[in-house]
Amino acid sequence: ARGRHSCSGKYKKAHVQLQEAIPRDLVHRLNRLPIVEAGTERRICVDDAHGSPEQECPRWIAGFCRGRNLRFTHSCWCKHKDRPTEKAIYRLVEVDLWGAKGTEIMDKFMQSTPFHDGGHPYVVAIHAVQNDTLAKLHEEYRAYLRNKNKEEPSVRELYHGTNNKIVDVLFKHGLQPPSDVQASDRCPVSGGKGLCTSLCNNDCKHCVERHYWDKCHMFGLGIYLADLSQKSHRYCSQPELLPNGRRRFRMVLCSVLGRALEVAGHLKYKEAMHDVCNVRAVGDELKDMIEPHCCSVPSKHAVEGADLLAVKGLGGAVRPGYSVVNSEYIAYHPYQCLPKYQITYEV
């Protein structure tokens, strides 16, 4: 690597991408040599950003490492702890459709109907999702954001539409940011569910093929949410097929934490943001990804202070495939989003 680079930012860790790989012995020497900062001599840790199997994961934030299920983008090959939800148990508690809470949820759900496919949904059941482990992790993530941003985190109630064959996985482990590998039909965990990305970590022996853009994940490999049920219905798949020809879907209503970075504009090319795995990953590159609409591109400072993306719907100014009609939110941490209710409806 040539030249000298001074790295500074809001957080303690600096990431530098070198044009050429440096030898291992030089990495070891850099860890032993002192660095002088503001007249004070100290040592710093220099390592490969992807880690190694014998290394304790330094990217474990609030019980989760984003690189654990990534092979090709921002992968992490460190030694990881078991997921804190491995022994989690959840239960669904029926909510009276005509009670105060049931009516509130149902009225809001119906406000954006009929759906894009012309369907008029009929809500048949609402269940509260109770998972004490996930609720505790959600509160720990709230405390993490409170400490990071020095303010009480914003809270939103948002819808999440997903493959209905994996809803039980979400209620046990939380909403999962997608992997960057395809789900293999040979995989006992991810296969046979109609998934385009794997549910597995990056050590799966079956799910090894890279997932490429295919009219999906427009704004990154994140958890997609919306404030309109009509929007989230687009992402619901694999419904139960009923004898009368109707389809029975399940949608999740979530509590979502964090400061949102609003992005209003069109992708410069269709796959521009497909591989983005967290908000900070866009950094200075957002201007190369987005053509702003009636605004400027958010600054790097704004990006560093954000916890999720809020992509503004452009209505009639939309460019199909490059921007969206209705707004959507993208989160990148499973415990940022707490499943609160399951809404079962027929179309």
Image (cartoon, rainbow, N blue to C red):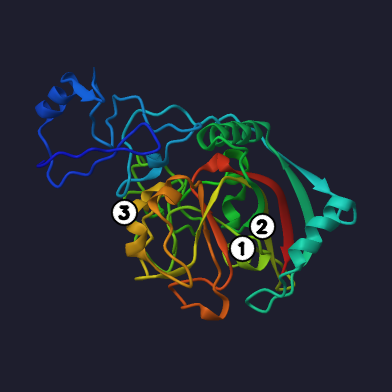
Is the N terminus in the top left, top right, bottom left or bottom right quadrant?
A: top left
Q: Position of residue 125 (x, y in %)?
A: 79, 56
Tell me if 3 is positioned left or right of 237 in this view: left
Q: Which residue sits furthest front?
A: 39
The answer to whether marks 1 and 2 mark residues whose Cβ atoms lie closer than 8 Å is: yes
Q: Which residue is mark 1?
A: 232
- Type of amino acid under label 1: Ser
Q: Is residue 180 visible?
A: no
- Type of amino acid under label 2: Met
Q: Which residue is mark 2?
A: 251
* Above or below for 258 versus 150: below
* Element type at mark 1: helix
Q: Earlier in the sequence, mark 3 or mark 1?
A: 3
Distance Cα–Cα, label 1 vs label 2: 8 Å
Q: Position of residue 345 (x, y in %)?
A: 74, 63
Bin the neighbour count of mark 1 within 10 Å (Cα to Cα): few under 14, some 14-19, many 20 and up. many
Bin the neighbour count of mark 2 within 10 Å (Cα to Cα): few under 14, some 14-19, many 20 and up. many
